[in-house]
Image: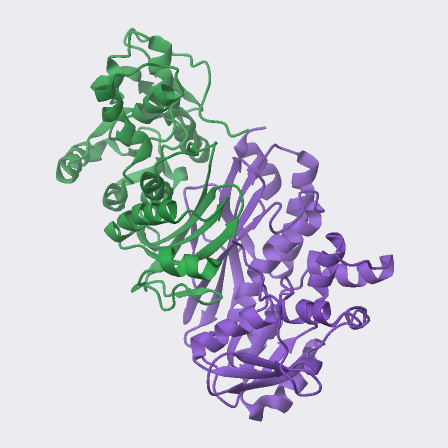
Chain colours: A green, B purple
Amino acid sequence: MSEFNLIRRHFTRSTPSALLGVGDDCALLQVSQGNVLAVSSDMLVSGTHFFADADPYLLGHKTLAVNLSDLAAMGATPRWATLALSLPSVDETWLAQFSAGFFALAQHYQVDLVGGDTTRGALNLCVTIMGEVPVGQALRRDGAKVGDEIWVSGKLGDAALALAHLQGNVQLSDADFAAVAAALHQPQPRVALGLALRGLAHSAIDISDGLLADLGHILAASQVGAQLEFAAIPTSSVLQNKSSLPPFFQQCVLAGGDDYELCFTAAVSQHTELLRLASALNLPLTCIGKVVAGTGCVVSDSAGNPIQLTRGGYEHF
Amino acid sequence: MSEFNLIRRHFTRSTPSALLGVGDDCALLQVSQGNVLAVSSDMLVSGTHFFADADPYLLGHKTLAVNLSDLAAMGATPRWATLALSLPSVDETWLAQFSAGFFALAQHYQVDLVGGDTTRGALNLCVTIMGEVPVGQALRRDGAKVGDEIWVSGKLGDAALALAHLQGNVQLSDADFAAVAAALHQPQPRVALGLALRGLAHSAIDISDGLLADLGHILAASQVGAQLEFAAIPTSSVLQNKSSLPPFFQQCVLAGGDDYELCFTAAVSQHTELLRLASALNLPLTCIGKVVAGTGCVVSDSAGNPIQLTRGGYEHF
């Protein structure tokens, strides 16, 4: 099968939001009046971000989800994406399932796949996602203010627990693994939350490399520090049951990557409004600490003593 | 070295054309009034698109050049790019040279690198390029009209000849190889030509997979056919000296990839204007045939007989 037939069969859908979609040298896109373009690229590599035998449908979902998560963290409305992929060979079944997972999520968020590239090589998936955000309303990392409350969505650490199970570092029952595997394999980008946080949050980031690492980017960009209470950080009952292993538990919660929840800061005066929003979105939003003057992040255990991690967020090299 | 230090050291330059550049979840970009966004993604894979020991400076140039070529073929003004790369290991010298080659070309065209990703994996370079084109002025593939003349810029086949030498399929003297290697290793995107062709050309494409394959996309999109005269196609004296091997010669000219010249069609009435443009740009523009009713492309040799190729354009799979 030629590259062109491959693209036609698996990666060409209608692109109602584009002036011109797949099939020319470039796609042509019209950014809506009063909006700026938000752009991010993420590359997923076999053996680094996923196992070579990963379920292709879920992989298609996750490839787009991690990119949508970047738009969510910016408060942007998803619009368009390009997908470049290198494949060791043409596996029709794999491609059909991968593209089905990708397009299911794309359709949910009305994202048009407007271009990309297909080539031979080690399995590598690179998405560039594009969205729109009204001028001046993007959620940036550099807006945290001393006195802000620090919030996270959902629960943290399940993706790291599921990965530890797959790597043989912990043993989970089938039921427990099933309960946490979705966080790893089918993360839900918090797009609706990101949109709702426009005008509410002072800063936001998505948690891809671990809470402390990602919150650390907000703190560094905003030139502030943070105090967190470990006990306040929302976790699943499956993960809590592993709390007989405190260092591992803390590692999953504070440094586990791949959660794709949002971490954001907002004025104390917005506390009630944010709880109302959580209810409206049917998504837990939890205040886990506060922004303070200074630098760095101190996490206190229930006795008020600082927790020291053995290692920080995910490091690629 | 952490991913963040790597990005800071090698891939963070000022981004005067962006509202927000590297360092947040997304870059924020303002498309100029009256313009639409032109977007394209290209992925270059070690062992497929370049040799693993390729000169990193030239590879940095080429990684951006092949993407700029897509903007050129659309008549778009280059503005921004993202770069996602996976690396087997961190080689500071390699990274410094690669980024130097990339940024030298980026600065020439005032392209801001506004985001991307860095991860561990087989060497893979994925650029998404973004440009602007006034509403309705993009050069598309589907605008060729019966009676149009077919033009190409520069000379064709040198990149294929250089590659054949590197693969041991032909033997070139050092001087001859030096004369054609630039086409392979340091292609010059025809950005100025693309901009000048707005309002002049009816259709355009860049020649990345070979003249017949790429012209074929124009013909298919425009639902027309073409007649070409082989002798009219511009080639270098080095390649002409290999014309004692007619099938190989024809293959390089008609099906050699990686030239990154533009192929475009325009009304006969623009013939003189296009020759004036060639002179103004100091870039050969050559009429090589005409658009006819029907489908497909017939290439005639000097005796008027059709040339049959043993294989078509570059196929990835």
**Res B71 seen here:** yes
As drawn, B227 above or below A162? below
Q: Residue A222 in the image: x percent, y percent?
A: 42, 34
Q: Residue at x 43, y 27 (%)?
A: A213
**Residue, far bottom:** B269
Q: Quadrant of residue A178?
A: top left
Q: Residue at x 30, y 63 (%)?
A: A14
Q: Residue at x 61, y 40 (%)?
A: B10
Q: Residue B33 in the image: x percent, y percent?
A: 41, 69
Q: Nearer the viewer, residue A277 or A315?
A: A315
Q: Residue B185 in the image: x percent, y percent?
A: 70, 56
Q: Quadrant of residue B200?
A: bottom right
Q: Nearer the viewer, residue A207 or B181?
A: B181
Please state, as top left, top right, bottom left or bottom right, where the N terminus of chain B lies in the image: top right
Q: Is residue A137 left or right of residue A179?
A: right
Q: Nearer the viewer, residue A279 or A97?
A: A97
Q: Residue at x 59, y 59 (%)?
A: B66
**Res B110 seen here:** no
As drawn, A111 above or below B1? below
As drawn, A15 above or below B99? below
Q: Residue A123 in the image: x percent, y percent?
A: 48, 41
Q: Quadrant of residue B35?
A: bottom left
As drawn, A133 above or below B73? above
Q: Nearer the viewer, residue B293 or A165?
A: B293
